[in-house]
Amino acid sequence: MSQVAVEAPPKGGFSFDLCRRNGMLSKKGVPPPSYRKTGTTIVGLIFQDGVILGADTRATEGPIVCDKNCEKIHYMAPNIYCCGAGTAADTEAVTDMVSSQLQLHRYHTGRESRVVTALTLLKSHLFKYQGHVQAALVLGGVDVNGPHLHTIYPHGSTDTLPFATMGSGSLAAMSVFESKYREGLTKEEGIKLVCEAICSGIFNDLGSGSNVDVCVITKGQKEYLRNHQSPNPRTYVSSKGFSFPKKTEVLLTRITPLKEMVEVIEGGDTMEE
Amino acid sequence: MESNQSNLHNSLLASEADSQRTLYPYVTGTSVVAIKYKDGILMASDMGGSYGSTLRYKSVERIKPVGKHSLLGASGEISDFQEILRYLDELILYDNMWDDGNSLGPKEVHSYLTRVMYNRRNKFNPLWNSLILGGVKNGHKYLGMVSMIGVNFEDDHVATGFGNHLARPILRDEWHENLSFEDGVKLLEKCMRVLLYRDRSAINKLQIAKITEEGVTVSQPYSLKTFWGFSAFQNPTVGAEGSW
């Protein structure tokens, strides 16, 4: 009898089966299909009382803007927020997952979550998947040790920085930060600088656009300013609105209430499924 | 197999040997940034020539005057820049030989360079440079750019290489008509400082050149002050000992 290998059911997680085939194809000269970059500008900076995060609101599918007003600043914990760039599904899934892990950890320890906890959970997950989970994140929050700001790259490396930018518009935003950032900014100055950096990304990078979202996190308090600035309003709006030329004619109206049709048998045995 | 491929290659391109065409740049200069200001043009570049990832040459002048009315700044292959300077030398020489009181202005030199770059690109033998041409003639300020494939345009502020991504946002926000000389230099220094922080092939030794109706001045090389004292840089792992 020939040995028939039983197909083990997939245990979940990423399947690396096609990697050998991909390697062989690229050696033969067949280029791999390019990934869809979702194009983003996300920034974070530390000011005197805490952390300010900012993001644009455009989601792209190749050359098309598929969502004009999406949310890129994700909730992780009451005192920690995370901006995500890269593949939208990856950033949503990974931040959701770590957010629930943090919640469980909070129940377990009875204490406020720390930013380094979120950082370690995210970076170990991303490293485990060797960069295939394409999420580039800017993680910021305030915990017992003070304000923290970190960047996390898709392969799992992290940086601790006073100001950070990620995404396709990161160079445009970084040029604003490098020339104007200083330590000990007040809240108004910080928000203004973050808005300037995001606007720089919106107007100078094609992958970023629409509005500016800002999130200010301080000790014990957070302010989520959705669409804090809308520098791209719709310029020409018809004052008449939409009107359909011909109304549908109603010929006959008959209403049949369906409740009396269904017989509900109270008691008795349950149905065979 | 290999000789078949090279024969095919040769017959497709009809050139004697591939070594005659520029395939990759070797010694490269990084970005150049230029703006129009009240009296003329200001142009800044650093003095580095990189050989791949090594900073091989640290005193390369990448901004040169051309004729009486123009300044040429280049990023990309340094040897191609030197070749372009030889072409322009010949051009200016012939212009002087006419001895008719006219001289080639920046617009004319820009047009000449565009033709040269585009023709070389059509022969699959490009001059691997992004050029910035600035000048003043008869009170008119001119600032234009030509890339290695022949894309050319004229604008109030231009940048090449990394400057496109890092300097252009700053210039779009903060440039305005009739900048004074001091304000123009401050604006250029702001751009060069960001480039110094974020471009790996930039060095902290730059020259700023100025051209006005009176003539050209290229400054002596100098360095910018940088700031590295953020508290987050001092002890990044204060919250979690042993991590990074």
Image (cartoon, coloured by chain):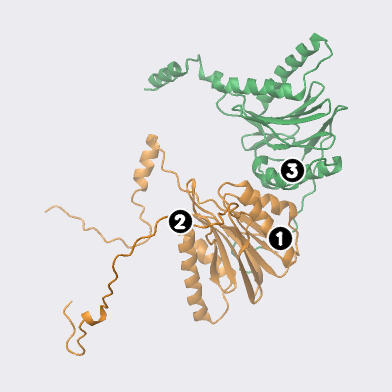
Q: CA distance from mark 1 to mark 3?
A: 23 Å
Task: Pick the quarter of the image with the N terminus of chain B.
Answer: top left
Mark 1 belongs to which subunit?
A: A
Tell me the element at label 3.
helix
- Which quadrant of the figure has residue B141? top right
Q: Disc 1 residue type?
A: Lys
The residue under label 1 is A192
Left or right position of A13 against B178: left
The chain assigned the colour orange in the figure is: A
The residue sitting at 59% across, 20% down in the picture is B120
Is residue A127 visible in this depiction of the protein? no
**Residue A78: image x %, image y %?**
57, 74
Q: Say which amino acid is labelled 3.
A: Met
- The chain holding disc 2 is A
Q: Give the residue type at disc 2.
A: Val
> Can you give x and y, in whole percent of width and height, for residue A15 in the image?
35, 55
Q: Nearer the viewer, residue A164 or A207?
A: A207
- Check if mark 1's residue and mark 2's residue have beta carbons within 8 Å: no
- Kindly identify which residue carries mark 2: A133
Q: Nearer the viewer, residue A159 or A65?
A: A65
The answer to whether residue B179 is above or below residue B88 is below
Local secondary structure at mark 2: loop
Which chain is drawn using green? B
Q: Which numbered dot is residue B192?
A: 3
- Which chain is home to disc 3? B
